[in-house]
Image: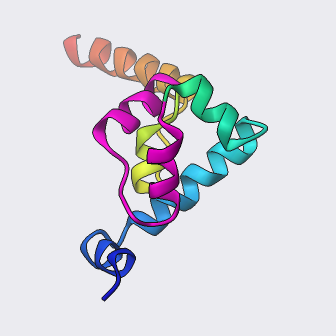
Amino acid sequence: MTKTQQLLHRYPQHSEILARFIEYVDTTYPSTRQFCQQSGINQTQLARVLRGESIFSADMLLKLSELGVDMNWLLRGVQAVADEERAKLLFYIDKLEGLIRK
C-alpha cells in the first residue's frame, strides 16, 4: 500500500476536505503560490498535502481560519449559519424569552 493509500485509508474524509480547500484557493487567489505568501503556509508543506502525502496540520488549519475560512465547511462540508440568519435567530430567541418570562 502506498503512503497516499495509507493516508486515505486512515483519513477517508481527506479527499473531500482537499477538494473544498482547492475550491477555496481557486476562487479566492490567482495561484497557490500567492495563497501561500498571504497565508504564511509553507509551500512545500502544502504541496505534500496536495499530493496526498500528508494531511493538514493544526497550524495550517489555524492559518486558514484566520483568513476567514469556515472550518465547518472545510472539514465537514457544512456551511455555518450566516450572520444575517444568526441575527434573526437571536431576535426570535429574545422574543421567545420575553414571552416565557411573562
The location of residue 23, given as percent across then percent down, is 65, 52
Magenta stretch secondary structure, dominant: helix
- Residue found at the very far left of the displayed protein: 101
The location of residue 95, given as percent across then percent down, is 39, 16
Residue 71 quadrant:
top left
- Residue found at the very far front of the displayed protein: 44
**Does the segment drawn in magenta span residue 15?**
no
The location of residue 26, given as percent across then percent down, is 72, 47
Q: Depth check: 91 or 33 in front?
A: 33
The boundaries of the magenta stretch are: 41-67
What's the residue at 61%, 27% (across, down)?
37
**Does the segment drawn in magenta span residue 48?**
yes
What's the residue at 58%, 33% (across, down)?
36
- Residue found at the very far bottom of the displayed protein: 1
The location of residue 5, given as percent across then percent down, is 36, 81
**Residue 73 seen in this snapshot:** no
Q: Is residue 2 left or right of residue 49?
A: left
